[in-house]
Amino acid sequence: VQLQASGGGLVQAGGSLRLSCATSGFTLDEYDIGWFRQAPGKRREGVSCINSNGGTTYYADSVRGRFTISKDNTKNIVYLQMNNLKPEDTAVYSCAAGARIIVTTLIYPTSYDYWGQGTQVTVSS
């Protein structure tokens, strides 16, 4: 099982980025996927999650209305579209996969079994 996040970069406040999580070694429609971020000196936090069939999504309050999670099972990729970025969104973003996660625990990092390397997102003011 492998996951690889990409698409990060440097953007001005108000700008947009689209992160991609490329997956391999498993069937995407059988796993729940979460996006998490960690800023320097802060704990890892859940940003957005999507369950295996795509019917349930979750967003942290801080990103709801600005970020959109989606997935393409044919390409085995999960996307995180990030609009109206703010300096406080600056962090390393990682994606993770887990199977049969209880819906109410989708946002917790401990619910996931597999993690990919992160991608840096930096938002300048």
Image: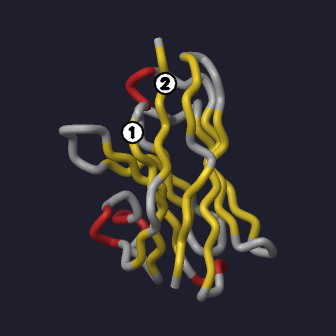
> How much space separates mark 1 and mark 2, taking CA atoms?
9 Å
- The numbered mark at residue 83 is none
Q: Is residue 85 left or right of residue 91?
A: right
Where residue 69 sits in the image (x, y, percent)?
62, 51
Figure check: 9 above or below 3 = above
- The numbered mark at residue 123 is 2
Q: Residue at left 32%, top 45%?
A: 38
Q: Residue at left 38%, top 47%?
A: 37
Q: Amino acid at mark 1?
A: Ala
Where residue 8 sits in the image (x, y, percent)?
57, 42
Q: Give the structural element (helix, strand or loop) at label 2.
A: strand
Q: Is residue 17 left or right of residue 44?
A: right
Figure check: 124 above or below 98 = above
Q: How is the image coloured?
A: secondary structure
Report which quarter residue 23 is drawn in: bottom right
Residue farthest toward the top in the current orientation of the protein:
125
Tag 2: Cα neighbours inside 10 Å, few (<14), some, or many (≥20)? many
Q: Is residue 28 left or right of residue 85?
A: right
Q: Amino acid at mark 2?
A: Val
- The numbered mark at residue 91 is 1
First along the sequence among labels 1 and 2: 1
Where residue 50 sits in the image (x, y, percent)?
56, 62
Q: Give the structural element (helix, strand or loop) at label 1.
A: strand
Q: Are marks 1 and 2 in contact (CB under 8 Å)?
A: no
Where residue 10 sits in the image (x, y, percent)?
55, 29
Q: In this orientation, which residue lies closer to the viewer: 43 or 61?
A: 43
Tag 1: Cα neighbours inside 10 Å, few (<14), some, or many (≥20)? many
Figure check: 107 above or below 4 = above
Q: In this orientation, which residue lies closer to the viewer: 121 or 51?
A: 121
Q: Residue at left 66%, top 43%?
A: 18
Residue farthest toward the left in the current orientation of the protein:
41
Figure check: 38 above or below 118 = above
